[in-house]
Image: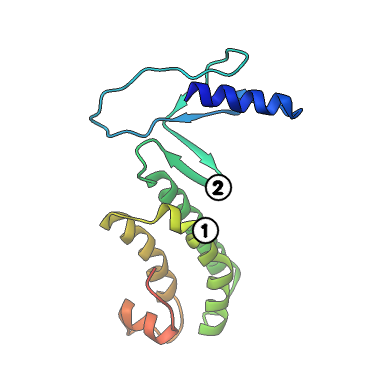
Amino acid sequence: MQDDLKSMFKWAKNNSMEFNTSKFKMLRYRHPKADVISYEYRSLENETISCHRNTKYLGITMSNDASFELQIDEMVSKAKQRMGWIFRTFKTREPDAMLTLYRAMVLPIIEYCSQLWTPVTIGQIRKIEALQRTFTSKIHGTNAMDYWQRLQHLKLYSL
């Protein structure tokens, strides 16, 4: 890996580019019970590339255990904030208006890069599904329905 990093730094230098090595972060993906190999990677200026437990890249929080638990927690928090804003700002609870707001302002937060961080545990799935469950329960005409009936009535899919 160090040889690959050196090649990358040299290529950048030959092409009049510079890397800001202070922004480099290293994540070590490994099994929690595996032995830790303490090897340091360095830049051409011999600066150590620091090892981190998690980092944010393109809006996705990645962690060294590959669980995406932090990403899911952050996404759920942001979606709840947006849902709260919708409920405080708009008086109507009519299905058309609420579904338009949900699809435009909440669903993009939930679905952003979900192919990468897809939930794998029942707890993660329930956290995400609870967002839609809560939102759909506030829509007029869905009071007597259970969650799955609401989804069918509103023509939504399970998350």
Position of residue 42 relative to residue 104, above or below, is above
Report the front residue among 93 and 124: 124
- Position of 98 with respect to 158 (left or right) is right
Q: Secondary structure at mark 2?
A: loop
Three-letter code for the amino acid on which mark 1 is drawn? Tyr
Tell me, yes or no, whether the two marked residues, 2 and 1, touch with CB atoms within 8 Å.
yes
- Position of 144 with respect to 26 (left or right) is left
Three-letter code for the amino acid on which mark 2 is drawn? Gly
Q: Position of residue 97 (x, y in %)?
A: 57, 80
Report the front residue among 96 and 21: 21
Q: Quadrant of the C terminus?
A: bottom left
Residue behind mark 2: 59
Protein image colouring: rainbow
Position of residue 60 relative to residue 24, above or below, is below
> Which residue corresponds to the image point at 53% horizontal and 16% vertical from the top-left?
48
* Label 1, residues with CA under 10 Å away: few <14, some 14-19, many ≥20: few
Labelled disc at residue 112: 1
Q: Position of residue 89 (x, y in %)?
A: 60, 68
Report the front residue among 146 and 1: 1
> Which residue corresponds to the image point at 63% horizontal and 24% vertical from the top-left?
9
> Which residue corresponds to the image point at 53% horizontal and 71% vertical from the top-left?
102
**Residue 48 can be seen in this image:** yes
